[in-house]
Image: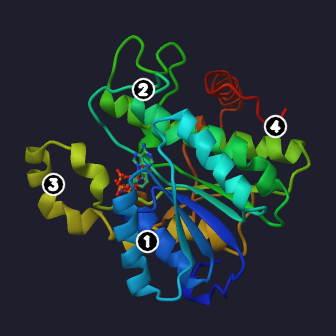
């Protein structure tokens, strides 16, 4: 079945959280959801950036129902405080879109000592899902959408060096974090089913799109890549569609993975795609889950 966002009817009265909603794909996802009359909580770390993104969303969808809530994924304390604030105000959550991410920064650690890509892209989203799960679970048809990347393909989970305790490879850590997001999404599907929950766990990747994510790529490499950008990438508006498919598609099932279906999965129409076999490894997924519970300090879906 092909997905056409124009054919999705209004989803009025639904509530979504989008992490990293102020930039790139998150902003486009917010616009896409707002067009379907979904109330969007923009979960962002920087209030003024979030305010200007909100203004942009409103300039495109003037009826948009948008609220900004501060969330810094560099800090588990912030994840806890965001979740508490949300739970005090709302008693339903239809869509949790885990989109925020960083790519190939110099070695830095989060407030809790995680390597920053693992912390921001994966561990904080793991805890966020855990803390919001009670609300998601009581919302009919709720979905959790995790964002991965083609970079998962060369990623591997190195349990002895999960947070760059021994060595740091920027690209290796990014691949590891994006593989972790996928292993998590598939393991979440299995555990939700086992727990008898109807919450749907899906995942997506955008292909390649020139956004602020590329800030850490050296200037010379950016210059050399420039002529190829229009050939191998697509604009954020289109790169957001696999996530919008995961969030809104009527034919979506738990465990599905969405991405662009064109050349090498880098661009093209959104569709159901397959991730690499190592992302379906149940043993690694289960071990990663256990480690994630331990490092975030909370048991999840026992
Ligand atoms: N663009 C691509 O080609 C591509 C390819 C594969 C996967 N992805 C994935 O798509 C997702 C969105 O990326 P993008 O391309 O839209 O990049 P982007 O434009 O840089 O957006 C990333 C978003 O994440 C937010 N973020 C970063 N660190 C955060 C933190 N500590 N706490 C809260 N929010 C934080 C950013 O906020 P600030 O503005 O405050 O930094 C921004 O809103 C990421 O998960 C990325 O890995 C992108």
Q: CA distance from mark 2 to mark 4?
A: 25 Å
Q: Return the disc, 2 or 1, that comes first in the chain's sequence.
A: 1
Foreground: disc 4 or disc 3? 4
Residue 2 is at least partly visible in this image: yes
Of residue 48 and residue 168, the one placed in the foreground of this image is 48
From the image, tell me which residue sits under label 2.
115
Residue 267 is at least partly visible in this image: no
Above or below, comparing residue 146 to residue 244 in the picture: above
Is ligand 1 within 8 Å of the beta carbon of the residue shown at mark 4? Answer: no
Above or below, comparing residue 2 to residue 261 in the picture: below
Q: Is residue 287 left or right of residue 198?
A: left
From the image, tell me which residue sits under label 4.
301
Of residue 186 and residue 101, the one placed in the foreground of this image is 101
Foreground: disc 2 or disc 3? 2
If the image is split into quadrants, where does the N terminus sit?
bottom right
Please tell me whether mark 1 sits on a helix, a strand or a loop.
helix
Q: CA distance from mark 2 to mark 3?
A: 28 Å
From the image, tell me which residue sits under label 3.
225
Q: Return the disc, 2 or 4, that comes first in the chain's sequence.
A: 2
Q: CA distance from mark 1 to mark 3?
A: 24 Å
Tell me what residue is drawn at x 7 percent, y 45 percent.
220
Please tell me whether mark 2 sits on a helix, a strand or a loop.
loop
Q: CA distance from mark 4 to mark 1?
A: 31 Å
């Amino acid at each position: 079945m092909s997905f056409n966002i124009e054919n999705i009817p209004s989803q009025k009265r639904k509530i979504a959280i989008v992490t990293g909603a102020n930039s790139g794909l998150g902003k486009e996802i917010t616009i896409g959801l707002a067009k379907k009359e979904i109330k969007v909580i923009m979960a962002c770390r920087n209030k003024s950036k979030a305010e200007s993104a909100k203004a942009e969303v409103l300039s495109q969808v003037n009826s948009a129902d948008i609220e900004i809530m501060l969330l810094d994924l560099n800090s588990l304390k912030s994840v806890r405080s965001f979740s508490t604030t949300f739970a005090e105000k709302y008693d339903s959550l239809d869509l949790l879109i885990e989109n925020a991410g960083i790519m190939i920064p110099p070695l830095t650690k989060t407030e809790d000592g995680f390597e920053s890509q693992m912390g921001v892209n994966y561990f904080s989203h793991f805890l966020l899902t855990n803390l919001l799960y009670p609300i998601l679970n009581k919302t009919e048809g709720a979905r959790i959408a995790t964002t991965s990347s083609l970079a998962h393909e060369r990623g591997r989970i190195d349990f002895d060096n999960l947070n760059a305790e021994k060595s740091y490879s920027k690209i290796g850590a990014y691949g590891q974090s994006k593989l972790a997001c996928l292993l998590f999404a598939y393991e979440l599907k299995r555990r939700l089913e086992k727990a008898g929950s109807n919450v749907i766990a899906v995942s997506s990747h955008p292909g390649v799109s020139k956004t602020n994510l590329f800030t850490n790529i050296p200037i010379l490499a950016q210059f050399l890549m420039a002529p190829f950008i229009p050939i191998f990438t697509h604009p954020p508006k289109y790169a957001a569609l696999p996530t919008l498919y995961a969030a809104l598609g009527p034919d979506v099932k738990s465990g599905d993975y969405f991405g662009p279906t064109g050349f090498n999965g880098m661009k093209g129409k959104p569709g159901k795609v397959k991730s690499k076999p190592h992302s379906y490894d149940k043993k690694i997924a289960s071990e990663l889950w256990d480690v994630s519970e331990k490092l975030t300090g909370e048991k999840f879906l026992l």
